Amino acid sequence: AELCTIFRARRSLDCSEQYDTFFGPATVQDQANVVGAAVLLGPGCKTDIESDWDSPFFNQSLSLLNFVTNNGRAEALQFDGILNKGLYISDSINVPVGGSPLATKLPAEQMTLGIWFNIDRADVGFAGLVAAQQNSEDCRKGWSLSYAQRPASTTITFSVALEANDVNQLSNFKAVSYSTPSPFILGDWHHVGAVYDGTNLIMYLDGDVVQNVSACAFSSCGRIRFPQFNDQISQCDPHGSPLTIGTLEDVTEGTTFPHYGGIKEVRLFSSALTSSQIRVQYDTFATQLRSSPVLQSEYWVKVTGDTGSMPSPNHDFTGSDSPVTLELRGRFDRTFDYSCEFAFGSLIASSAVGTISCSSDLPPALCSGGLGDLLLCDTPTWTFGFKSTSMTVWRHSGNTSVPLWQRLCLKGACGFENPRSNSWQTIGSTTRLNPDLVGTTTKFRFIERSTVFKFDSGVEEFSALSYFSAETACATGSCFFNRRTCQQGSQQGLACNTDGDCGGSPCGSLERFATMGVSSVTHFSVDSRQYLLAANYWDGETTRVGSSLFEIDVIAGTVEYLQQIPTNGARQWLHVTVSNVPFLLIASCFERTMAYPWSQNASNLELDAGVELDTPWCQSSIDSFMVENTSYVLISSFADTESGSRNVPSFLFKLGVAMSATEGLFGEQVEPITTSVSPGQAVAVLQQSFATFAATNVKHFTVGTTRFAVFACGSSDSPTKVYASDVSSDPPLFEHVQDLNTSQATSLDFFVSGAPYLLVAQAGGESLMYRFNGTLFLLDFGEDVLPKDTASGQRVKITKTLSLKPMQIEMNGQVEDYLLVGRYSDTKESPQSSLLFGYHDKVQAMDGPVSIQISPVTGLHVYVASEHSRSILVFNRDPESGSLLFNADSSFFTNWTLSPVTDADPPESVPGKNAFGHPLHGVQNMLFSSNAQQLYVASSMDNSVVVFDCDPLSGKITLKQVLENGMVDSGKVIFGMLGARAVSLSVDEQSLYVASWGDKSVAAFKREPSDGTLSFVDAQLEGTRFVHEFADSPILQTPSSGSWSRDQFPAQLGGTGETWAFSARQTERFDIGSRSFVAVAASESDPRSTGGAAVIYEWNSQTASFTFVQSLSDSPGASCLDAFTIADPDLLDTSTTYYLAVGNSYHEGSPDAGVHLYTWAQDRFVRNNTLSVTVNGTSSVLHANNVQSFIAGSTRYLVVARAWSTAFPNTSSVVFRYQNGFGFIQAQFIHTSGAMDVEHAFVTSPSGQLNLNLLIFANFLGPAGTHDSSTVDVYLHDVATGRFVFHHALPALGAFAIDAFELSGEGRFLAVANRQDRPPFVPGDVFAYDVESQIFKWDPQSVRYLAYQSIGSEFPSIVDPDAQPIQKQAFCEPTCVASDDGVTQPVYVLRGVTSMHVFEAEGETYLAMAQSVCEPKSSAAECAAFSSQPQSAILQFNKGTKLFGELLTVTDVDNEAARGGILAESDYNDWVGSSALRINAGRAVAWEFLDFPNNPMILVSSLTKGAVVYSWQFRKVVGLVGVVDAIPNYNNDRVYAVSQIDAALVSLWRATLFDSLGRNVRTCDGGCLHFLQAVSHKTLGSGVNEVALNPDLAGLEGARKMFLVPGPSCSSSAPCRLAVRVGTFRDELVCGPLPPISPNAASENALGSPAKCQSISFSVSQLPGGVTLFATPPAIDMDGTLLF
């Protein structure tokens, strides 16, 4: 604020100076305030070439300003070695050094010197940039940064004297130098960093290290040595070392080495900066300087005109839309183009290319050769409001533009003359350099004109009536802001210096720019006179400007200036009557709110009677209201102007009028006051503070019985706050009731038009119109708006809004609504304020709106689907404002919409589905195609997706297609559509997806792009299981002593080191008490083999694992097993005895091993007996293929299917009967032919009684000893004799195994495994085993089994996947045809069926078929050489077809759990799919189902893999219970669904998958839907069905809608990001702080039914000590009910 000057008396004796030296400003500030300012001393003798300094007047002398230069972005100082030889911080470094290292202000331990500079001479032998040095023969101390500019290079040197280099305290300089490969280009800016870190000297150039040298020969080089430190021996002169910038002077030597060029900045640090810190120093100005060289021959200069010179530029202001031509002085080259730029921060406007000419007062020699000294620029249109800009001239050459530095020309290259002639460069009639030529930044104002508009009701438009600010353009001459102006005549308001400038009228001192940077204009009236108060915020540079009072002459349509009121950052005026006394209050940003009484006599404000209100912050607005007769004012606060914090409170004051020094009148009440005011002045008492942030505006209004105070928030990340009070409260007490989500809100207003509305203008986006619903102010009315929030506002599609003003004008007897929108602009577009018209539209048939869509191409229509009205309504939409107009003609109404069916109004006849609103019965969701030609609708009650055609011009929709659940479409039955909830389209719009709540499914449709029609593709339903994912490899092998757990499927039972571990022939599951066991007949079928055994395992249900119990090694040929119990009353121990019968087949190494009976004792089995057969008194070993024990009548039997040898194939089987006290005794021989299996069956007689016992044998050979004549013989138990009598035979082909079973509701059956019809002819002759197996059904009437189903060619076989290619080829010959997968080659028969085992799991019946090829007695090696093995098949009984088929993908249990009912017979044909299951079980010979709780398993007996356990749990679709939405990814190969009830995210994929046979699991165009994964916070499955648990997903229970976050396509490397919109269930939300408005409220506020929300209140009572309220705490049910 103060000017630093230089004065010294003239030197006349030794220097012929004419005048004293007196000039200013003369200093450059030390911004760190450490060493002091740098001073421009001026010349020592102002003669000869330095005579430009010799001036008789202070204002005619050169100063520091003449050497400042700028490019519009940065300022610098230029040095020429003559007029400016350098700056002096101190003429002796003794001052900053202080004589001691501890006292020095200069760096001593370390230092960094940084400088931005340029050079403007081509040949400089030596020049100093910054120096604090003495360099004489007897004293070399201090430091300096210098350079030499030569034709070949530029050398920069940093020299420093250090302790370690001190020789006899004379010191020596250690220097680091760097020479550039080529010299610096003149005028180019460079940054040099010089660092001493205590060890090294480092030099940086333009941010990069260029030199790094050791500073001394030691590890530490000590302090920097200055002349003042320890100078006892040296001859240093403490006054001979100045601290300089732009020069290096050694007083002792009398030498000076000035810099030639510019310096932008010098930074000196007392530490060693790192390379990254140096880079920051460089980057700070690199953008502004490196691309902005100081051009040597061109420049422009500001001429202030202070000494009477013609100013440059000749104007410093104009109207934003009133261009003027600027005249700029300088030197311009006609080969280039030049333009003028005006910038205020990031706001920039540029002129067109200017015109170059020569002024009349410049010698022709300086305006020749294509040069000119005058540039004419026309100012551009400025659209950014009242601003003081920085001006820059740009030079353009092709595509290259550089700023032209504004500076004083000091060298011949730019036209500097010495001696020179008279011109604008000189002062007056002298030839001295004109001191008005300065390089400081040129400011240029663009000012705005304030206008009064008048509304014309005829055309519904505003037109300008009067301008109440001064004229902003000059007719002639130069115009300068805030200078004298012409007071009268046609040139009134023009800038002037003399009366002559005004055509003889007075050039006065009154500033008539009455409106400058206006924040707001307030209208008020007193009596019948109308007034305007303009709140002037700033004049472009300062906020300390006065505000203005005007009077409006309504008849003449003019505005007259009356008074100026001193304000500082004025924001808003308020006219308020306080106790019948009128006051004007002004809220200002940089001073407290003032209250001025209104002078009735003078018609102005009584400025001397103004009173401050206690408002310490930046006030942004003010509003008032009255309670009874008491006045209150609300004042919003924007920020703390000292700290910058915007977290400041706003205020509520009660206003009164002082009656005396101690009392004031507040309304009609006299109250004591404590403020020091005079009678008649305003008194303000603080009533309440409000927690606000950056409040830009405050608005007060009332709705019904509620008073509101709303504070607009000017921040983009904080809300606008709504406070409320009861309207009758006096004084009012406001409470915070709501936050409005706004962005840079600028102003507020309120109006009532049918309903209350709150307007919020926003600078950060479109402006907002909130509607009050009786509880809350609401804006948008989207699909997730709750019933209790039934109110909709509007987004006013106009951005950068400063104010919104509602108007209600009566026209033609009707009140019309208008909205004035005031805008600002920060772009080159002119801000257009707008007048909007309001209208109301009555809408019907929109009961229960559930979905909204906007036509995607034009945005001209909005579609609303209404569930209760069963309709789709169309609204015409204004794309600019977003306003809607109901279009009934384009809407779609159903019969229900027009005539609902009710009990009071039933239909005339039996109603069809059309009467109930088909196809929109239960409409839930809509979606447009991107071309807006089709609208897709999900209808939950019609279980359908509906397609409408849409006319893009009229918006009319026409029904095109309806696809319903159960409908046949292109040969496919549509399924998965029950309760259709949501629809979505793929990005390519070739697929449509439907999420169905009822079916808990996602359905896929193909979309035809040409017409938008749909065809059904597939659906994925909750509970669908994935048979194709069955895990049958790799098989885990466990140690014999170890255990096996359920997560290790499949697994081999038995140790890896046991000889019997890799061959099993049969298994038996049994219980002993509460313990569960599995026995394995672990031996090979080859009679030559050894090492077999019967092995016992126990199942541990706690650990879910098998544990090895026992190996019965005395059964080395164990082939079959049966476990049973007997309670023998004739024994001493009459308790139940647990038996295990182990049948051994013939083995050469153990021929005596037959049928052993073991009993359970002391946790193990002990051999109790061995059965033998006696023929003609001769006893022999009994070898067995199978054993079975059962009870017929009351007798326990044990039957042995007798083994055979080559010599005796027809050995009879044997029946043993248990006799109490004696055990099993031989009872009967039954003739069999190679019996491989025996089965007991219990069947019904013709009377329907279940009383017939059958004994059935599977004969592998027929009477002729061939397979093709074999039979299955059925014997009937004769109750009288206890013997089994042959009943009938069933034809067979090498019958190998049988299984009797019952199907509930279907009857009793017998499965016969036919293995082969002949022996193989040669190795590889697998065709011998290609025979059909049979299912027989018991017929009670004919009392025999009848053929029921052949397991034939419809069930193919496939080879072991581990087989070699040649083996695979041999397996399928002669017709090897690849399946759907192109790899698998099925054989169309179940080859080599060795056994059939029927089991039931979860209500479904399965048929497990063990398959193998090669002869039964072949060794493993022989079998391997013969052929590869087939995989074994598992079939399932189909309740629809009543036959066994491939496995079904949905079971009754899963369907009932998911959809509440078992499958109907039609479901099996319509949508339940099937998938083949073939298990790689090797040379399989038997299956068994293990029904352990929660761990169902199937166990195979394999002669090549041993006893292998497979899990009988399939992975299933989970997570779709309560599905509400499904969307595809960008590639349409993934589909994501979200569910409310399961609270899960589900991932599906589109693909073609194959079952065990290589056949398509399902065939779908574009790929079927398959389940991938579900994630939830709930446990939705178990075992293989377990989902990924994530506790953070609990919020999905309120899921509404899902969408993909925009980004890259979903892939393994770029996963999809999903967003789910969630919310509380609609009937569970708590009411807001204000009660819902009632239906009988005032008509202007009535909004219909009360809002539907929950009111919650609590009553708390303390119980007396020791009293317990509940024995157990109550639980909370899922629906929120307390359960006691």
Image: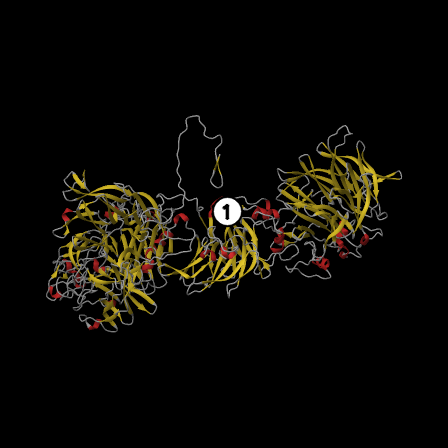
The residue to which callout 1 is attached is 1543
Q: Position of residue 1414 (x, y in %)?
A: 76, 52
Left or right of 1145, for residue 27: left
- Mark 1: which secondary structure? loop
> With 944 as the anchor, is 442 left or right in this view?
left
Residue 180 location (% of width, % of height) = 36, 61
Its colouring scheme is: secondary structure
Closer-to-camera residue (1583/631): 631
> Residue 122, image x and y in percent?
29, 65
Number of marks in the rendered image: 1
- Estimate the x, y position of residue 317 in percent, counting from the top left: 21, 62
Return the residue nearer the eye: 384 or 482.
384
Camera sees residue 1157: yes
Can residue 1509 be seen here? The reply is no
**Residue lying furthest right:** 1176
* 1590 versus 431 height, above or below: above
Residue type at the position of mark 1: Ala
- Which residue is at the far front? 908
Q: On the rendered structure, is 1123 left or right of 484?
A: right
Q: Residues within 10 Å of mark 1 (few under 14, many from 20)?
A: many
Front residue of 793/1101: it is 793
